[in-house]
Image (cartoon, rainbow, N blue to C red):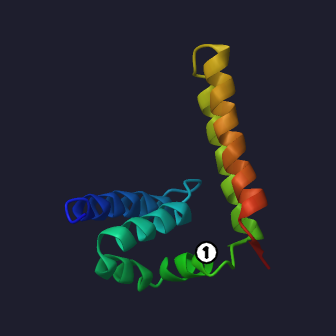
Amino acid sequence: MPRVRPLWVMLGFVLSSLGFVGLLVPGFPGTVWFVLAAAAFAKGDPRWEAWLLSRPVVGGLISDYRAGRGMPLRAKWIACSCIVLAVVFTMTRLPGLSAQLLWGLVGLAGVGFITLRVPTRR
């Protein structure tokens, strides 16, 4: 589907932008956005994927994740803490118990994925 490829590239740029924000803003995760951006670039244009993988700061993180080496324990703690803080902060502003519970489940799924599915690199 050649028409879809430019959409994947655009998504890759949006996700990369979020990743670069994550490098600059303390508490905002960056690695996850770069991993997703690399996946989007792989579907859209492998040249952009290669460019992202060649970046000195993020290329190694993406390669480690893809190779199954996972995340360092410190990074997992930071990611889970950021998820919990963001979910709690947002839950206090959501109207209705059902919306709060749903948002809590989304946060729990994120923490669960990081702790149970992503290998810990030591």
| x and y, in percent, of residue 7 in the image | 26, 58
Identify the amino acid type marked 1. Tyr
Which residue, given by chain and number where applicable, does mark 1 sit on? Answer: 65
Question: Where, quadrant-wise, is the N terminus in this rendering?
Answer: bottom left
Pick the front one: 3 or 80: 3
Q: Residue at x 48, y 61 (%)?
A: 33
Residue 84 in sight from this viewpoint: no
Relative to residue 31, is residue 17 drawn left or right?
A: left
Q: Position of residue 103 (x, y in %)?
A: 63, 31
Q: Residue furthest top?
A: 96
Residue 107 higher or lower than 53, as above or below: above
The percent position of residue 101, horizontal first and vertical second, equals: 69, 25
Q: Nearer the viewer, residue 83 or 103?
A: 103
Note whether 88 is above or below 55 in the view shown: above
Residue 79 location (% of width, % of height): 66, 56
In the rendered image, the quadrant that contains the C terminus is bottom right
Whether residue 45 sits left or right of residue 25 in the image: it is left
| Residue at x-position 45% and y-position 62% | 19
